[in-house]
Amino acid sequence: MSQASTVALWIPLLPLASAAALAAVSITERGRKAVPALAVVPTAAAAVLTFVVLFGHGTGAATESRVRYAATGGPELWLGARVDGLAALIAVLVGVVATAVQLYSVTYMAHEERYTSYTALISLFTAAMLVVVYSTDLLLLLVGWEVMGACSYFLIGHHWERPEARSASIKAFLVTKFGDVPFLLGILFLAHGAGSFRVEPIVQHAIHQGGHGYTAAGAILLIGGVMGKSAQIPLQTWLPDAMAGPTPISALIHAATMVAAGVYVVARLYPVFLVTPAALWILAIAAALTAVTAALSAFAQRDLKRILAYSTVSQLALMVAALAAGGRDAAVFHLMSHGGFKALLFLAAGVVIHKAGTGNVDELNAHGLRRKLPVTFVTTTIGLAALAGLPPFSGFFSKESIAGVAYETATQSGPAKSVLGTPPSGIGWLVLIATLLTGLLTAAYCLRTWWMLFVPLDRVWLRRDRKAAETPAEAAAEVAKTIVPASETGAAALEALVAASEEAKSEPGAVVGVGAGAGTGVEEGTGAGAAASAGEGAGKPRTGPEAPLAELGPLVVLAAITTVFGFVGLNHGWFASWLGDADGNAYRTAAAEAGKLIQPADAYRLSPAPLSTLLAVLALLLGLALVFSALRAKPGTDPNRVLGLLRRPAREGFHADDLQDAVAVRPVQLAADAVVFLDAEVVDGYVRGSGTASRALGEGLRRLQTGNVQLYLTGVLTGVVVIAAALGFGR
């Protein structure tokens, strides 16, 4: 046992104890004043201990602390912690983000009657993710995996009195459970092949035996759970609707817990996937499709939280794509980078929604948030810049590392100097193209979101000709001022305003309205996420200061991390040394150059490469130019009109819900109806028929039982005569 792994054993118990204490308070309704402390202090202590484990582990090889808790006659079951660089780094991410969310929620959720149960579930959620991160046994990992699913169900449905929250929670639970079935089977296959549920024997079995038999089957089956938890095609539909939950929960789910778990499991068992080309191709194709379509959907959304939700789906796809292309280090680098700036963006969105009383970006454009929310403006700008991949923020370095590893895989020549080699070059080309296209779209929707939040769409200096004709919105305002005289009746004024509004609405993408808060636009948001902001102060904007310190503090800290974290990739070998090799052994540059590690040396280098950096920057600039040219061409209109015919289907998530309904829901409903029919008409029919026959037979026998002795004797005599006659004729 090592000191780091021993400490790791106890870390999940802190938020678990917090959850138990908060649940007791919720049930007994005593000690409510202590709820914030019970929520924040244990989670913060767990976060501090994750740093102790990280620095205690350092750049060494994986260590374990475990005890056997069940002898099954087959693979033994172990209770313990396995600490390698991957687990140590991701645990820090979980601890920091969970602490930020708990602290932020102290004031953000202070008005909630169910605040105590809410914090208890966050603590349990955090404990479950830490179990997934540190677990040395895949069955124990599965326990944490499933507890997270249960917590997400309750937290997404926190506002259970709202129908969209109830349906979103059920949807999230069912869709992810659909992927968990093959995930469980995959664990069983891997354990059967390796003879153990522990991570180390499974990884070593894959390295020495290759991607055959149970290893290949297990890797492919595990992808089901990964697609569900990390919201990848075809199981991506639950995450945008999950925005019906409170905004801090969205930050926790999107940044450090549930959606990160799928990517983490692939990185944890990476040799299993690396030796299975079929699994890599499945990951690459699903990730490429998800990254591009989700980015298009984010560009088309009008609800702030749905924009961020689709961006999470797209960025997770980039991580999965990096893993498919042989970039485990790049994927983990982006997972940590994304966790920081996505938590920042969601928490900043919560401040915006509370202040403005809406999450609709068209309406937010009229609120002058840049001056009202100076801290939120700066931190949101940093978060969106990182998401877009703008240097020098962390997203630029982490996303460029994905493009770099994809380029290296695509252009590989000759045998790779490593233990397991590299994925097929076709995967590299697919991932590279998807990464660049996603980078272009991400830059576009980030600029569009920033502009819709903080800069008036009809800003005069945007126009090519400042004396150009009025926009439709200006025409409506002019009608209100000049065409409608003060002496007109209210009905006449209303009629004139309606006519002007109809004229303005004829312009695609126009933001139409009169007065502050106007601008609902032509099309309304759809789905549960469109109403996500409704339960968080819609129509009741916060007055007074920007936000409490408990909310602004996490924003500033996360913004600082987002600003500096990317530079860790510039130091050659630094991040790789802390992360370690894919089999848990320590990373050494000399060993990588000699081809003695799991992957080729280039897979561990995260510093920007000239050509891939140039391509990534070009994609970034094209995305920014696309939106800026749209803003200049038609001021006052939503720049996402450049999507043309794709805008409406992208806003609807390309009708993935309808496809799932046709492929999965309706067939299951038809099968259920068939079972009901068979049960009611066939099985019950036999039961009812046997009862009816018994009653008929009984009725017939009852008619013979008249109580007349003479009739009975006559019957007996007749029977004797018939039998005797029969016997006589028989001779």
Image (spheres, grey):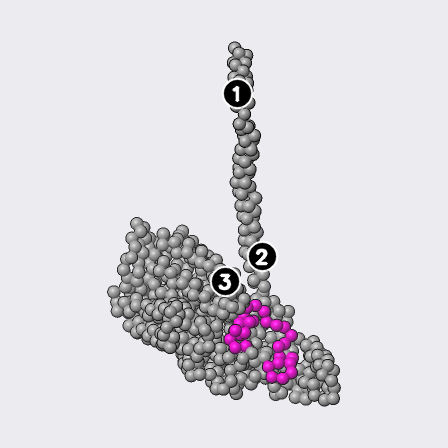
Q: Which residue is mark 2?
A: 662
Q: Secondary structure at mark 2?
A: helix
Q: Nearer the viewer, residue 405 or 80?
A: 80
Q: Give above or below for 659 relative to 731.
A: below
In the image, 34: left or right of 368?
left
Position of residue 727 relative to residue 4, above or below, is above
Q: Amino acid at mark 1?
A: Leu
First in sequence, mark 1 or 3: give its number.
Answer: 3
Residue 441 screen position, x and y as percent: 55, 73
393 vs 72, left or right, is right
Q: Is residue 645 magenta?
A: no
- Mark 3–mark 2 contact, CB under 8 Å? no
Residue that numbered label 1 is attached to: 713
Seen at 53% across and 81% down, the residue is 541
The answer to which of marks 3 and 2 sits earlier in the sequence is 3
Residue 451, position as x, y percentages in the image = 56, 81
Stretch of the chain drawn in magenta: 512-538
**385 vs 615, nearest the viewer:** 385
The kind of residue tagged 3 is: Ile
Q: Amino acid at mark 2?
A: Ala
Q: Which mark is residue 170?
A: 3
Residue located at (39% from left, 71% from top): 29
Element carrying mark 1: helix
Tag in front: 1 or 3: 1
